[in-house]
Amino acid sequence: MSYPTTLGQDAGSRRSDPRRTGIRGALRAEWTKLRTVQGTFWLLAGVIIATAMLSLIADAATRCPAERCPIDPARTGLTGIDLGQALVVILAASAISSEYSSGVIRTTFTAMPRRLNVLAAKAAVITGLVLLAGGVAVLACVLAGRSILAAHGLTAARGYPVLSLGDGPVLRAAVGSVLYLALIALLALGVAAAVRETATAVGAVLGLLYVVPIIAAVLGNSQLARHLQQVAPMTAGLAVQATTGLRSLPISPWAGLGVLAAWAAAALIAGGLLLRLRDA
């Protein structure tokens, strides 16, 4: 994504006006930038479509011919989060790194000298957009999974929880999945603020998300693999989707989401410190 350079007009008067340089002004500026970039809404649409489509494929491929199968309907129905998060990473990382590549970041910091306000505003706007897109995507996944999985034998009569937001564990899995996407966005934003380059930031975050679980899966040491799953942002965070077999999880659902929140907070703190210490 690239941003218009007209944001630098009358930068001097903006510096002298606290209404524009404060957090409220930063929020307005960041919202204006994101909503005027066409790629923002294409990526948000992509998050919804990719998440829903992969979940539909997973639902359609799931069968339970026996009386009881080791399948978690909620987790199966929310499989698309695994793919949707990649587009969230691109969206969040581009929100700041594309300004560095285009040079617009100098204009942004001239108009908004308080750099942490800029980062906080970007985080707030991106989080809001991702929560909205994630909510739509998760709702679509739950509604589709409810009918498809029931048709494939995963019914309440056979001991499976029905995919319904009225069911406590399913509601937790759905809400947790939306929060998961928002935390992934904050993680990507923090990394991008630190490294400044879109490709580097996206590659680093996607590697952290997808490669670490693969390493854990191929490790010969089961105890070490379990510890790795407890601290890796994807495996820990997605534990919030589990509604069955909770005792066998490497980490409990909300604790796993807490691990991801810690990763996101650490990335934002590091990105914010580097944002203040380095020149634009």
Image (spheres, helix red, strand yellow):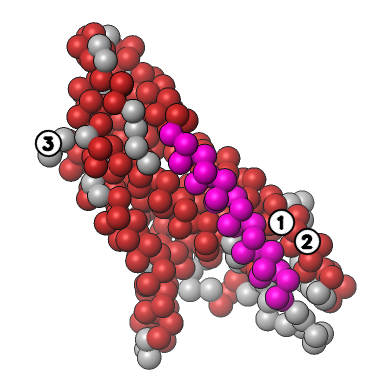
- In the drawing, does residue 107 fall left or right of residue 173? left
Q: Give me the C-alpha separation between circle 2 and circle 3.
A: 52 Å
Say whether residue 241 is magenta: no
The amino acid type of the residue labelled 3 equals Asp
Instruction: Indicate whether 203 appears above or below 106.
Output: below
- As drawn, the label of residue 59 is none
Density class for disc 1 (Cα within 10 Å; few <14, some 14-19, many ≥20) is many
Residue 120 shows in the view: no
Q: Which residue is mark 1?
A: 142
Q: Quadrant of the C terminus?
A: top left
The disc, 1 or 3, on the residue closer to the chain's N-terminal end is 1
Q: Give me the C-alpha separation between circle 1 and circle 3.
A: 46 Å
* Closer-to-camera residue (89/120): 89
- Spot the residue most to the bottom: 220
Q: Give me the C-alpha separation between circle 2 and circle 1.
A: 6 Å
The amino acid type of the residue labelled 1 equals Val
Mark 3 falls on what kind of element? loop
Residue 150 shows in the view: yes
Q: Which residue is mark 2?
A: 146
Q: Position of residue 83 (x, y in %)?
A: 52, 61
Instruction: Please tell me which residue is depicted at 56% across the width and 59% down the height of the picture.
Output: 81
The amino acid type of the residue labelled 2 equals Arg
- In the drawing, does residue 142 fall left or right of residue 46? right
Mark 1 falls on what kind of element? helix
Instruction: Please tell me which residue is depicted at 58% across the width and 57% down the height of the picture.
Output: 50
